[in-house]
Amino acid sequence: MDVIDLFKKAAAALQTDERYLALAAARKANDEDEALQDMIGEFNLARMDLNNEISKDERNDERVAALNAKVNDLYGKIMASEGMVAYNAAKADAEALISHIDAIINTAMNGGDPMLVEAPSAGCSGSCASCGGCG
């Protein structure tokens, strides 16, 4: 079996990991949350209105300020919603998993022992090129 086939099997296994499943479930819940989707739609329209107003030759600074406040308010509400809080937590866990996998691959490609790679600490990008830490 070649290395590509092994990585394909590993990628399939990744899709059974609890962190992947939690992210998929959070994404699905947000997609099905009508109130959240309505707020996102309203945010997108307000952002388009803001961009249109800003790009006018003779823009109305009061309108720009009002639209900017609306965009910021909607963004805050979206990000504070229960679904988005859960999604962002699940996303952070999934990104940590991917950073760990990336660190393993980078260690192996640099001649290190991939079996010795521990999960990167907070702030680790997974790129070993500029790090002397893990392996």
Image (cartoon, rainbow, N blue to C red):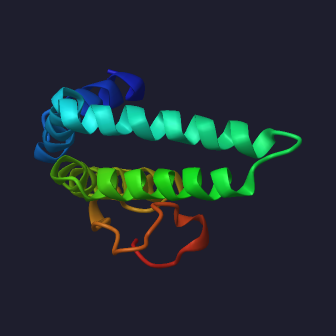
Q: Quadrant of residue 99?
A: bottom left
The reply to whether residue 106 is in sight is no
Quadrant of the drawing holding the C terminus:
bottom left
The image shows residue 53, relative to residue 96, as above or below, that is above
The reply to whether residue 23 is in sight is yes
Q: How many marks?
A: 0
Q: Position of residue 27 (x, y in %)?
A: 23, 36
Along the line of sight, which residue is nearer the eye, 57 or 105? Answer: 57
Q: Position of residue 91 (x, y in %)?
A: 28, 50
Q: Quadrant of residue 4?
A: top left
- Residue at the spot 33% in from the left edge and 75% down from the top edge: 121
Along the line of sight, which residue is nearer the eye, 96 or 61? Answer: 61
- Residue at the spot 56% in from the left edge and 41% down from the top edge: 47
Quadrant of the drawing holding the N terminus:
top left
The image shows residue 23, relative to residue 85, as above or below, that is above
Q: Is residue 117 left or right of residue 125?
A: left
- Residue at the spot 48% in from the left edge and 36% down from the top edge: 44
Residue at the farthest right position? 57
Q: Position of residue 63 (x, y in %)?
A: 65, 50
Q: Is residue 12 left or right of residue 107?
A: left
Q: Quadrant of residue 88?
A: bottom left
Q: Position of residue 23 (x, y in %)?
A: 21, 42
Along the line of sight, which residue is nearer the eye, 70 or 90? Answer: 70
Residue at the farthest bottom position? 133
Along the line of sight, which residue is nearer the eye, 96 or 24? Answer: 24
- Residue at the spot 47% in from the left edge and 52% down from the top edge: 70
